[in-house]
Amino acid sequence: MAVTESAVAPMGREPERTRSGHEDERARARREGDGVRSVHEGILRRQAARESAARTYARALPVVPVRARGLTIEGADGRRYLDCLSGAGTLALGHNHPVVLEAIRKVLDSGAPLQVLDLATPVKDAFTTELFRTLPPGLADRARVQFCGPAGTDAVEAAFTLVRAATGHTGMLAFTGACHGTATGAPEASGGAHDARMTYLPYPQDYRCPFGTGGERGAELAARWTESVLDDVTPSVSRPAGMILEPVQGEGGVVPAPDSWLRRMREITAARSIPLIADEVETGVGRTGRFWAVEHSGVVPDVMVLSKAIGGSLPLAVVVHRDDLDVRRPGAPTVSFRGNQLAMAAGTATLAHVRENGLAARAESLGTRMLTQLRGLTDHFACVGDVRGRGLMLGIEMVTAGAASSPDGTGPPPSAPGLATAVQRECLRRGLIVDLGGRQAGVVRLLPPLTITDEQAEAVLDRLTDAIASVAAAADGRDSVSPIPEPPGGSGDPPGG
């Protein structure tokens, strides 16, 4: 039944139907809206004045979150957004999932200590038990786990220290386009520093193949290059202590490693007694359609670096490794914040929920459908160069249409970070939060929670497609990117939000 004006009028008072009355209502709504915007803008101004220039997401995403649930964020300005950033992949179950909140409350209500260094606790025991339950069988059977600092960077550093101590060597092998963190050794592996101890190898991909071939041929050439580097040793150059790789390069532009190439890396390292380190910080806990991304290829690494989603939205990082690499003495350098009980409880709940509800398989099926729909964009927009991904880890590379990336005119068009930034901005105006990545930040990235519904996925694709269409039209000079009018109460109310 339709709600009439009289039905919502205060008791004992006739509804005001005068023109001035309607104007008063609109004026009051404007005042309330102005007040909300004032709070929002004030917080952003103070952040810009007080925080370091090192802040990143806050520059591209001027959102002030005040409430969140699942895929949805509500900002201080009253707008709602579909969040496909998911805390840079830390939120496997989305914001404030009930099982995570219940696990945290249970620890808080129990009176258990919240920080215990590396002491044994029931909470930690439950976490390690659940973690071992999910590991690839070939590793779980003989694994040890090291709790390190709370970030993925800390886990990478700990993994480097582990394999260097076990092998007696110092050099490391890493791949172009990688991102393994921001501390001392992690940027070396990410190409962020030049150090003689780090050797960079080509990472295969189809769209921007380093050998100009792509496909199986490109992957084979990359493998041969690796073998050549490792076999071209001299008495003054020792074997490396380990090789670190991402099964899918996330920050590198959502580039999935070919399964055949991953198997070759396992064969090459095993034949030379070089520990293989799989960086599953972003790809783990069901994100790519398997619980761990290495499972797509059947590869069992010697070391796995885990963080982000394993903490259930709270800071937690661990290194899982073969028992024969466990040669460090008690008291070896480590950090204080490695006993976060709340993170372990939240992590246990997240790991169990993903496993028990088949969310990895769900990510694979839904991700495949989304990828298929997104690939259709390359037929409609010349500025969409490539669409790729695995599971719910998706990327759209924006390019400069009609331009050549090499003097001879071969190869894909050059990446267009300006267009990617414009797409991110237009998505935000439509109530959609996305990330950027790639070598030149020319890739629009989607990392939705594994709990995203089919209806929400369609809403994400609709808003993203509309944003790309707007940017493409502006790039072609046919139209300008115009503001999208906000409906009353804020834009971007998501389905099921």
Image (cartoon, grey):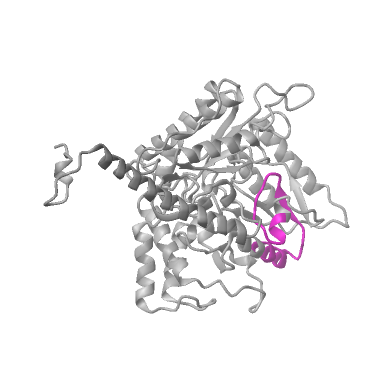
Above or below 231: residue 416 = above
Choose between 102 and 389: the one closer to the eye: 102
- 136 on left or right of 157: left
Above or below 125: residue 442 = above
Residue 402 appears in which quarter of the rendering?
top right
Residue at (82%, 56%) from the top-left corner? Answer: 196
Quadrant of the snapshot with the N terminus: top left
User: Do we see residue 15 in this rendering?
Assistant: yes
Membership of 177 in magenta stretch: yes
Residue at (60%, 56%) from the top-left corner? Answer: 48
Membership of 488 in magenta stretch: no
Extreme left residue here?
A: 12
Residue 162 appears in which quarter of the rendering?
bottom right
Residue 293 drawn at (x, y percent):
53, 47
User: Do we see residue 75 in this rendering?
Assistant: no
Total number of numbered discs in the rendering: 0
What range of the chain is rendered magenta?
159-187
- 450 on left or right of 324: left
Residue 31 drawn at (x, y percent):
38, 49
Choose between 386 and 224: the one closer to the eye: 386
Residue 292 drawn at (x, y percent):
51, 51
Above or below 226: residue 469 = above
Residue at (33%, 42%) from the top-left corner? Answer: 26
Residue at (14%, 42%) from the top-left corner? Answer: 6
Residue 355 drawn at (x, y percent):
39, 54
Choose between 292 and 264: the one closer to the eye: 292
- 64 on left or right of 46: left
